Image (cartoon, rainbow, N blue to C red):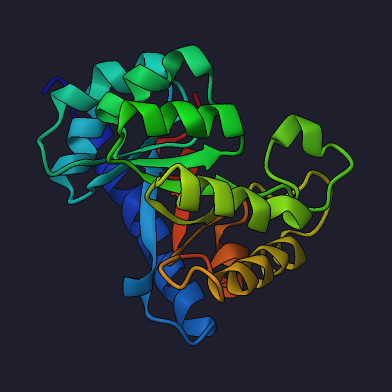
Amino acid sequence: MTTSDNRLPELSANLRSVQERVRAAALSAGRSEDEITLVVVTKTFPVEDIQALYSLGVRNFGENRDQEGSVKAPQLPSDSIWHFQGQIQSNKLKSISTWADVIHSLDDRKHAQKLSELGTNARVLIQVALEDKLREDRGGVDPDLLSEFLEEVIGRMKLNVVGVMAVAPLGVEALPAFQQLTSIFQEVRKKWPQLSAISAGMSGDFEAAISAGATHIRVGSSILGSR
């Protein structure tokens, strides 16, 4: 590992600070911090930083681009859990399915069909579009069409769907948006009780996500810094 001498203490302090914030947010919401998986988003950062985070106990890492994840994942121990959370490109799905343990951002039937044909073992979350005039830029399945989409990808395509994901809409308060996501999740879980994951919240709003019921938060800059 070639992490600089001052990088490990920096990462350690930042990680500890985020973990303390997670603990406080969970306590405030009447939840256990054990219910919340911290996914450290490592996009654009070198593998040495990821190895340093692994030495600090982190096991869940998130990447937005196959070009990075496919290179970094093999360089970490096998008990690392890799999350793909970026916009899916059809021509990258075969590669993504070789290294990603969890895919957070499925929102397209053609992509779901390809994953099914690839026989992926990845756990899949369906990205949901929350109320947002710019939703077309943020991706996601329309909530009104979510049940139909789940019927297809779980029933017909047999994907291992474990939950839902969303990105908070631009320019609005995050908490109501994440509460909307939890409400959507609870509704579809009536038909698919195996669903268990709500992926929501990033560096700027993960406390609101925890308050609303998120089980997975995706935090990058608060731990790794700005790139």
> Where is the N terminus found, in terms of image quarters?
top left
Q: Which residue of the protein is positioned furthest toward the front in this rendering?
A: 156
Residue 187, position as x, y percentages in the image: 64, 73
Nearest the eye: 217 or 13? 217
Q: Which residue of the protein is positioned furthest toward the right in this rendering?
A: 133
Nearest the eye: 155 or 65? 155
Residue 166, position as x, y percentages in the image: 62, 50
Q: Name the side, left or right, on which 88 lies relative to 176.
A: left
Q: Which residue of the protein is positioned furthest toward the bottom in this rendering?
A: 30
Name which residue lies at 39% across and 66% down. Answer: 36
Q: Is residue 96 above or below residue 133?
A: above
- Quarter of the image for residue 201 reads bottom right
Can the viewer see residue 99?
yes
Number of numbered discs visible in the structure rendering: 0
Name which residue lies at 49% across and 31% down. Answer: 113
Name which residue lies at 29% across and 19% down. Answer: 70
Residue 107, position as x, y percentages in the image: 61, 38
- Quarter of the image for residue 81 reads top left
